[in-house]
Amino acid sequence: MLSGLCALLCHFGCKPKTEEKEKEGQYFVTSPVYMDTAVTREYVSQIRSVRNIEIRAQERGYLETSYVDEGQVVKKGQLLFKIMPKIYESELQKATAEAKAAEIELKNTQALADKHIVSPNELALANTRLQKAKAEQALASVHLAFTEIRAPFDGIVDRLPRKIGSLIEEGDLLTTLSDNSQMYAYFNVAEPEYLDYAGSAAKNNKATVQLIQANNQVFKYPGVVETIESEFNNETGNIAFRATFPNPDRILRHGETGKVQMKVQLKNAMVIPQKATYEIQDKRYVYIVGKDNTLKSKEISIAAEMPDLFVVGSGIGAGDKILLEGVQKVKDEQKISYQYQAPEKVIAQLRLKAE
Protein backbone atom coordinates (compact mmCIF):
# COMPACT_ATOMS: atom_id res chain seq x y z
CA MET A 1 0.00 0.00 0.00
CA LEU A 2 2.80 2.39 0.92
CA SER A 3 4.57 1.67 -2.39
CA GLY A 4 1.39 2.29 -4.39
CA LEU A 5 0.71 5.54 -2.58
CA CYS A 6 4.22 6.83 -3.34
CA ALA A 7 3.83 5.93 -7.00
CA LEU A 8 0.49 7.75 -7.14
CA LEU A 9 1.93 10.88 -5.52
CA CYS A 10 4.89 10.78 -7.86
CA HIS A 11 2.60 10.55 -10.87
CA PHE A 12 0.48 13.56 -9.95
CA GLY A 13 3.41 15.53 -8.55
CA CYS A 14 5.71 15.18 -11.56
CA LYS A 15 3.18 15.82 -14.32
CA PRO A 16 2.64 19.55 -13.67
CA LYS A 17 6.40 20.09 -13.47
CA THR A 18 6.89 18.42 -16.83
CA GLU A 19 4.13 20.49 -18.39
CA GLU A 20 5.54 23.66 -16.82
CA LYS A 21 9.00 22.87 -18.19
CA GLU A 22 7.59 22.35 -21.66
CA LYS A 23 5.67 25.61 -21.37
CA GLU A 24 8.77 27.49 -20.26
CA GLY A 25 10.69 26.12 -23.25
CA GLN A 26 8.13 27.52 -25.72
CA TYR A 27 9.10 30.79 -27.50
CA PHE A 28 7.14 33.21 -29.64
CA VAL A 29 8.37 33.86 -33.16
CA THR A 30 7.24 36.40 -35.75
CA SER A 31 8.35 37.86 -39.09
CA PRO A 32 9.19 41.32 -40.45
CA VAL A 33 6.30 43.17 -42.04
CA TYR A 34 6.27 45.71 -44.84
CA MET A 35 4.12 48.77 -44.22
CA ASP A 36 3.76 52.48 -44.94
CA THR A 37 4.70 54.45 -41.86
CA ALA A 38 6.27 57.70 -40.72
CA VAL A 39 9.32 58.42 -38.63
CA THR A 40 10.29 61.55 -36.74
CA ARG A 41 13.90 62.55 -37.12
CA GLU A 42 15.84 65.10 -35.11
CA TYR A 43 18.50 67.45 -36.46
CA VAL A 44 20.75 69.88 -34.61
CA SER A 45 19.93 73.36 -35.85
CA GLN A 46 21.33 76.87 -35.77
CA ILE A 47 18.71 79.58 -35.25
CA ARG A 48 19.07 82.88 -37.11
CA SER A 49 16.99 86.03 -37.40
CA VAL A 50 15.34 86.67 -40.75
CA ARG A 51 17.37 89.88 -40.82
CA ASN A 52 20.51 90.41 -38.78
CA ILE A 53 22.73 93.30 -39.85
CA GLU A 54 25.70 95.27 -38.58
CA ILE A 55 25.15 98.98 -37.97
CA ARG A 56 28.37 100.77 -38.93
CA ALA A 57 29.48 104.38 -39.03
CA GLN A 58 29.53 106.01 -42.45
CA GLU A 59 31.47 109.07 -41.34
CA ARG A 60 34.45 109.82 -39.09
CA GLY A 61 33.97 111.74 -35.86
CA TYR A 62 33.26 111.55 -32.15
CA LEU A 63 30.21 109.63 -30.96
CA GLU A 64 28.15 112.48 -29.59
CA THR A 65 24.95 110.72 -28.50
CA SER A 66 23.58 107.19 -28.18
CA TYR A 67 19.80 107.11 -28.08
CA VAL A 68 19.38 103.38 -27.39
CA ASP A 69 20.47 100.76 -24.89
CA GLU A 70 21.53 97.14 -25.38
CA GLY A 71 18.59 94.80 -25.92
CA GLN A 72 16.19 97.64 -26.69
CA VAL A 73 13.39 97.18 -29.23
CA VAL A 74 13.45 99.90 -31.88
CA LYS A 75 11.23 100.93 -34.78
CA LYS A 76 12.14 101.57 -38.38
CA GLY A 77 13.56 105.07 -38.82
CA GLN A 78 14.24 105.57 -35.09
CA LEU A 79 17.39 107.57 -34.34
CA LEU A 80 20.08 105.33 -32.81
CA PHE A 81 23.33 107.34 -32.77
CA LYS A 82 24.66 110.77 -33.63
CA ILE A 83 28.27 111.41 -34.62
CA MET A 84 29.48 114.97 -33.90
CA PRO A 85 28.15 116.87 -36.92
CA LYS A 86 29.90 120.25 -36.61
CA ILE A 87 32.40 119.72 -39.41
CA TYR A 88 29.73 118.43 -41.77
CA GLU A 89 27.38 121.27 -40.86
CA SER A 90 30.10 123.76 -41.78
CA GLU A 91 30.79 121.98 -45.06
CA LEU A 92 27.09 122.13 -45.90
CA GLN A 93 26.95 125.85 -45.13
CA LYS A 94 29.98 126.44 -47.33
CA ALA A 95 28.51 124.42 -50.19
CA THR A 96 25.18 126.23 -49.84
CA ALA A 97 26.91 129.62 -50.04
CA GLU A 98 28.88 128.59 -53.12
CA ALA A 99 25.71 127.36 -54.77
CA LYS A 100 24.03 130.70 -54.00
CA ALA A 101 26.99 132.61 -55.48
CA ALA A 102 26.92 130.46 -58.59
CA GLU A 103 23.21 131.14 -58.97
CA ILE A 104 23.77 134.91 -58.76
CA GLU A 105 26.62 134.64 -61.26
CA LEU A 106 24.36 132.76 -63.65
CA LYS A 107 21.69 135.47 -63.41
CA ASN A 108 24.23 138.20 -64.18
CA THR A 109 25.66 136.23 -67.08
CA GLN A 110 22.15 135.67 -68.40
CA ALA A 111 21.46 139.39 -68.34
CA LEU A 112 24.68 140.10 -70.24
CA ALA A 113 23.97 137.34 -72.71
CA ASP A 114 20.52 138.79 -73.40
CA LYS A 115 22.25 142.06 -74.40
CA HIS A 116 24.78 140.13 -76.49
CA ILE A 117 27.60 141.36 -74.30
CA VAL A 118 28.90 137.86 -73.52
CA SER A 119 28.94 134.79 -75.71
CA PRO A 120 26.58 131.82 -75.33
CA ASN A 121 29.59 129.76 -74.25
CA GLU A 122 30.12 132.05 -71.28
CA LEU A 123 26.47 131.55 -70.28
CA ALA A 124 26.81 127.75 -70.57
CA LEU A 125 29.95 127.84 -68.41
CA ALA A 126 28.13 129.82 -65.70
CA ASN A 127 25.28 127.32 -65.77
CA THR A 128 27.77 124.45 -65.40
CA ARG A 129 29.36 126.14 -62.38
CA LEU A 130 25.91 126.40 -60.78
CA GLN A 131 25.19 122.70 -61.37
CA LYS A 132 28.55 121.75 -59.86
CA ALA A 133 27.90 123.92 -56.81
CA LYS A 134 24.48 122.32 -56.31
CA ALA A 135 26.01 118.82 -56.57
CA GLU A 136 28.58 119.72 -53.91
CA GLN A 137 25.77 121.09 -51.75
CA ALA A 138 23.82 117.83 -52.11
CA LEU A 139 26.96 115.79 -51.27
CA ALA A 140 27.59 117.86 -48.15
CA SER A 141 23.97 117.34 -47.15
CA VAL A 142 24.40 113.55 -47.51
CA HIS A 143 27.56 113.60 -45.37
CA LEU A 144 25.70 115.53 -42.68
CA ALA A 145 22.79 113.06 -42.82
CA PHE A 146 25.25 110.21 -42.27
CA THR A 147 26.07 111.64 -38.84
CA GLU A 148 22.59 110.53 -37.74
CA ILE A 149 22.28 106.74 -37.78
CA ARG A 150 18.74 105.37 -37.86
CA ALA A 151 17.23 101.88 -37.71
CA PRO A 152 16.55 100.47 -41.20
CA PHE A 153 13.80 98.17 -39.84
CA ASP A 154 12.04 97.14 -36.63
CA GLY A 155 14.33 95.05 -34.47
CA ILE A 156 16.33 94.49 -31.30
CA VAL A 157 19.61 96.30 -30.62
CA ASP A 158 22.56 94.13 -29.64
CA ARG A 159 25.69 95.09 -27.67
CA LEU A 160 27.07 98.64 -27.94
CA PRO A 161 30.87 98.32 -28.21
CA ARG A 162 31.47 102.09 -28.51
CA LYS A 163 30.59 104.55 -25.75
CA ILE A 164 29.78 108.26 -25.96
CA GLY A 165 32.89 110.30 -26.69
CA SER A 166 34.67 107.54 -28.61
CA LEU A 167 36.42 108.52 -31.81
CA ILE A 168 34.63 106.69 -34.60
CA GLU A 169 36.29 105.87 -37.90
CA GLU A 170 34.35 105.30 -41.07
CA GLY A 171 33.14 101.68 -41.09
CA ASP A 172 33.44 101.11 -37.31
CA LEU A 173 30.85 98.74 -35.82
CA LEU A 174 28.33 100.51 -33.58
CA THR A 175 25.89 97.66 -32.90
CA THR A 176 23.96 94.81 -34.51
CA LEU A 177 20.23 94.91 -35.26
CA SER A 178 18.09 91.75 -35.43
CA ASP A 179 14.61 91.37 -36.84
CA ASN A 180 13.20 88.53 -34.74
CA SER A 181 9.62 88.60 -36.01
CA GLN A 182 10.43 85.32 -37.75
CA MET A 183 13.35 82.97 -37.26
CA TYR A 184 15.28 80.67 -39.55
CA ALA A 185 16.44 77.26 -38.33
CA TYR A 186 19.22 75.77 -40.46
CA PHE A 187 19.92 72.04 -40.20
CA ASN A 188 21.88 69.47 -42.22
CA VAL A 189 20.24 66.35 -43.63
CA ALA A 190 22.12 63.26 -44.82
CA GLU A 191 21.64 62.17 -48.41
CA PRO A 192 19.54 59.03 -47.70
CA GLU A 193 17.21 61.03 -45.44
CA TYR A 194 16.98 63.77 -48.04
CA LEU A 195 15.94 61.19 -50.62
CA ASP A 196 13.29 59.83 -48.21
CA TYR A 197 11.99 63.37 -47.73
CA ALA A 198 12.07 64.22 -51.44
CA GLY A 199 10.30 60.98 -52.30
CA SER A 200 7.51 61.47 -49.78
CA ALA A 201 6.94 65.23 -49.87
CA ALA A 202 3.84 66.23 -51.76
CA LYS A 203 4.33 68.57 -54.69
CA ASN A 204 4.38 72.23 -53.60
CA ASN A 205 3.57 71.14 -50.04
CA LYS A 206 5.87 72.46 -47.32
CA ALA A 207 6.69 70.05 -44.51
CA THR A 208 5.71 71.09 -40.98
CA VAL A 209 8.42 70.76 -38.32
CA GLN A 210 8.79 71.27 -34.58
CA LEU A 211 11.61 72.99 -32.71
CA ILE A 212 13.04 71.53 -29.50
CA GLN A 213 14.73 74.31 -27.55
CA ALA A 214 17.89 74.01 -25.48
CA ASN A 215 15.81 73.36 -22.33
CA ASN A 216 14.16 70.38 -24.11
CA GLN A 217 10.86 72.24 -24.32
CA VAL A 218 8.89 72.19 -27.58
CA PHE A 219 8.57 75.66 -29.10
CA LYS A 220 4.85 76.31 -29.25
CA TYR A 221 4.76 77.59 -32.82
CA PRO A 222 5.41 74.99 -35.56
CA GLY A 223 7.56 75.90 -38.53
CA VAL A 224 7.72 74.94 -42.19
CA VAL A 225 10.59 73.79 -44.40
CA GLU A 226 10.83 76.48 -47.05
CA THR A 227 14.15 76.03 -48.78
CA ILE A 228 16.77 73.38 -49.49
CA GLU A 229 20.21 74.31 -50.71
CA SER A 230 21.19 73.38 -54.24
CA GLU A 231 24.34 71.36 -53.45
CA PHE A 232 25.54 68.66 -51.06
CA ASN A 233 28.59 69.25 -48.92
CA ASN A 234 31.27 66.98 -50.39
CA GLU A 235 33.01 66.56 -47.03
CA THR A 236 29.99 65.61 -44.92
CA GLY A 237 27.56 64.28 -47.53
CA ASN A 238 24.83 66.53 -46.10
CA ILE A 239 22.56 69.13 -47.59
CA ALA A 240 21.24 72.15 -45.69
CA PHE A 241 17.53 72.69 -45.03
CA ARG A 242 15.98 75.93 -43.77
CA ALA A 243 12.79 76.03 -41.72
CA THR A 244 10.95 79.24 -40.84
CA PHE A 245 9.29 79.70 -37.45
CA PRO A 246 6.98 82.55 -36.40
CA ASN A 247 8.25 84.34 -33.30
CA PRO A 248 5.52 86.76 -32.14
CA ASP A 249 6.62 86.59 -28.48
CA ARG A 250 10.27 87.25 -29.42
CA ILE A 251 11.36 84.22 -27.38
CA LEU A 252 13.80 82.99 -30.00
CA ARG A 253 16.96 85.03 -30.46
CA HIS A 254 19.65 85.12 -33.11
CA GLY A 255 22.42 82.59 -32.40
CA GLU A 256 20.36 80.09 -30.38
CA THR A 257 20.65 76.36 -30.94
CA GLY A 258 17.97 73.67 -30.89
CA LYS A 259 16.77 70.52 -32.56
CA VAL A 260 14.37 70.39 -35.47
CA GLN A 261 11.98 67.44 -35.51
CA MET A 262 10.80 66.52 -39.00
CA LYS A 263 8.39 63.74 -39.87
CA VAL A 264 9.29 61.71 -42.96
CA GLN A 265 6.89 59.31 -44.65
CA LEU A 266 8.32 55.88 -45.47
CA LYS A 267 6.75 53.75 -48.18
CA ASN A 268 6.82 49.96 -47.88
CA ALA A 269 9.28 49.97 -44.97
CA MET A 270 10.39 46.72 -43.28
CA VAL A 271 9.34 46.92 -39.62
CA ILE A 272 10.14 44.66 -36.63
CA PRO A 273 9.48 45.02 -32.88
CA GLN A 274 12.36 46.51 -30.90
CA LYS A 275 12.11 43.75 -28.30
CA ALA A 276 13.07 41.19 -30.97
CA THR A 277 16.58 42.71 -31.13
CA TYR A 278 19.60 42.88 -28.88
CA GLU A 279 22.69 45.08 -28.96
CA ILE A 280 26.39 44.25 -28.79
CA GLN A 281 29.00 46.99 -29.15
CA ASP A 282 26.63 49.43 -30.86
CA LYS A 283 25.43 46.80 -33.33
CA ARG A 284 21.94 45.35 -33.51
CA TYR A 285 21.18 41.64 -33.91
CA VAL A 286 18.17 39.33 -34.18
CA TYR A 287 17.84 35.56 -33.88
CA ILE A 288 16.57 33.85 -37.03
CA VAL A 289 14.83 30.50 -36.62
CA GLY A 290 16.07 27.96 -39.18
CA LYS A 291 14.21 25.03 -40.72
CA ASP A 292 15.44 22.69 -38.00
CA ASN A 293 14.29 25.15 -35.28
CA THR A 294 17.87 26.19 -34.63
CA LEU A 295 18.63 29.82 -33.76
CA LYS A 296 21.21 31.83 -35.67
CA SER A 297 22.14 35.42 -34.78
CA LYS A 298 22.09 37.94 -37.63
CA GLU A 299 23.30 41.51 -37.65
CA ILE A 300 20.82 44.08 -38.98
CA SER A 301 21.04 47.76 -39.85
CA ILE A 302 18.50 50.14 -38.38
CA ALA A 303 17.20 52.70 -40.87
CA ALA A 304 14.86 54.46 -38.43
CA GLU A 305 13.44 54.14 -34.94
CA MET A 306 9.87 54.52 -33.73
CA PRO A 307 8.23 53.82 -30.37
CA ASP A 308 8.51 50.03 -29.87
CA LEU A 309 9.53 49.47 -33.51
CA PHE A 310 12.61 49.51 -35.72
CA VAL A 311 12.68 50.13 -39.47
CA VAL A 312 15.23 47.65 -40.83
CA GLY A 313 17.58 48.75 -43.58
CA SER A 314 19.25 45.40 -44.28
CA GLY A 315 20.18 42.03 -42.79
CA ILE A 316 16.90 40.08 -42.94
CA GLY A 317 14.12 39.40 -45.40
CA ALA A 318 10.34 39.30 -45.27
CA GLY A 319 10.24 35.51 -45.15
CA ASP A 320 12.59 35.16 -42.17
CA LYS A 321 11.24 34.02 -38.82
CA ILE A 322 12.73 35.98 -35.93
CA LEU A 323 12.65 35.32 -32.21
CA LEU A 324 10.21 37.75 -30.62
CA GLU A 325 10.92 37.39 -26.91
CA GLY A 326 13.64 35.92 -24.74
CA VAL A 327 16.54 37.06 -26.91
CA GLN A 328 18.69 37.44 -23.78
CA LYS A 329 18.01 33.84 -22.65
CA VAL A 330 19.08 31.95 -25.77
CA LYS A 331 22.26 31.51 -27.77
CA ASP A 332 23.46 30.59 -31.25
CA GLU A 333 22.72 27.08 -32.52
CA GLN A 334 20.16 26.48 -29.77
CA LYS A 335 17.10 24.46 -30.78
CA ILE A 336 13.79 25.81 -29.54
CA SER A 337 10.12 24.98 -29.56
CA TYR A 338 8.12 27.97 -30.74
CA GLN A 339 4.73 29.36 -31.50
CA TYR A 340 4.38 31.66 -34.51
CA GLN A 341 2.54 34.98 -34.21
CA ALA A 342 1.51 37.04 -37.21
CA PRO A 343 3.45 40.34 -37.33
CA GLU A 344 0.25 42.38 -37.70
CA LYS A 345 -1.04 40.91 -34.45
CA VAL A 346 2.27 41.54 -32.70
CA ILE A 347 2.31 45.21 -33.72
CA ALA A 348 -1.31 45.64 -32.67
CA GLN A 349 -0.44 44.36 -29.19
CA LEU A 350 2.48 46.74 -28.68
CA ARG A 351 2.08 49.54 -26.19
CA LEU A 352 2.57 52.15 -28.92
CA LYS A 353 1.68 51.39 -32.51
CA ALA A 354 3.44 52.61 -35.61
CA GLU A 355 2.22 55.96 -36.83
Image (cartoon, rainbow, N blue to C red):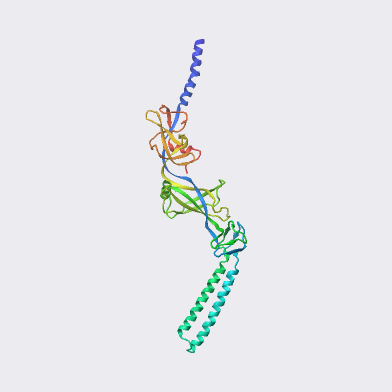
The single residue placed furthest to the bottom in the displayed view is 115
Place of residue 96 in the rendered image (x, y in percent of width and height, measured from the top left): 56, 76
- Determine which quarter of the picture holds residue 276: top left
Place of residue 216 in the rendered image (x, y in percent of width and height, measured from the top left): 55, 45
Looking at the image, is 301 positioned above or below residue 331?
A: below
Asked if residue 31 can be seen in this view, the reply is no
Nearest the eye: 61 or 189: 61
Looking at the image, is 314 positioned above or below residue 336?
A: below
Q: Residue at x 43, y 29 (%)?
A: 338
The single residue placed furthest to the left in the displayed view is 291
Nearest the eye: 173 or 298: 173
- Determine which quarter of the picture holds residue 341: top left
Looking at the image, is 281 positioned above or below residue 264?
A: above
| In-image side of 322 versus 181 (left or right) | left
Asked if residue 348 can be seen in this view, the reply is yes
Place of residue 347 in the rendered image (x, y in percent of width and height, measured from the top left): 46, 38
Place of residue 78 in the rendered image (x, y in percent of width and height, measured from the top left): 59, 64
Number of numbered tags placed on the structure image: 0
The single residue placed furthest to the top in the displayed view is 1
Looking at the image, is 185 positioned above or below residue 114?
A: above
Q: Residue at x 51, y 13 (%)?
A: 6
